[in-house]
Image (cartoon, rainbow, N blue to C red):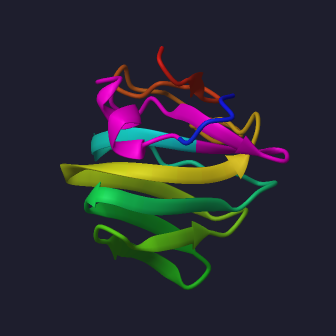
Amino acid sequence: MSNEPIALDEALTSFDALWSPRVVTRVNDYDVRIAKVEGEHIWHVHNGTDEFFLVLDGELHIGLREPTGERTVRLPRGAVFTVPRGTEHRPSAPTGAAILMFEPTGTSSVGDHPSEIPAHIDATTGHPLGT
């Protein structure tokens, strides 16, 4: 990790892969990850941790399956949202988005027990920036 400031707009131009988060820095035992996203992710759940999203550009939709039923949260540029641990969710971005996520180091991008993972989704715990 760098001990110099990181320009997120420059970091985002360093890769093209969708749904393939890059770790820009760490805070204690947490990764700060950025990703470019478009289309749909898979329904998944993180049983042991919340998942924080900040929309840097575009609009992110997060489908949620909650005890009261399904709903979709729409996050425009600059909005934040935390998916509570144990909540099944599916991020999507119909017109594309750039996002920042904050989650414990080692958290899988496809949740705790993924089923079938489509080819357009990278099952990872985050790649170093610049790869």
**Hey, which quadrant is residue 56 in on the image?**
bottom left
- State yes or no: residue 34 in magenta: no
**Residue lying at 69% horizontally and 50% vertically, measured from the top left:** 103
Q: Is residue 46 above or below residue 54?
A: above
Image coordinates of residue 45 in percent, x first then y, are 64, 52
Image coordinates of residue 61 in percent, x first then y, are 33, 63
Q: Relative to residue 70, is residue 125 drawn left or right?
A: right
**Residue lying at 29% horizontally and 30% vertically, measured from the top left:** 13
- Check the picture and name the quadrant holding the N terminus: top right
Asked if residue 42 can be seen in this view, the reply is: yes
Residue closest to the far bottom: 68
Image coordinates of residue 63 in percent, x first then y, are 41, 65
Image coordinates of residue 106 in percent, x first then y, are 76, 33
**Residue lying at 42% horizontally and 39% vertically, measured from the top left:** 35
Residue closest to the far top: 131
Residue closest to the far front: 4
Q: What are the residue bounds of the magenta stretch? A: 6-32
- State yes or no: residue 24 in magenta: yes
Asked if residue 45 can be seen in this view, the reply is: no
**Residue lying at 34% horizontally and 35% vertically, measured from the top left:** 10
Number of numbered labels in the structure image: 0
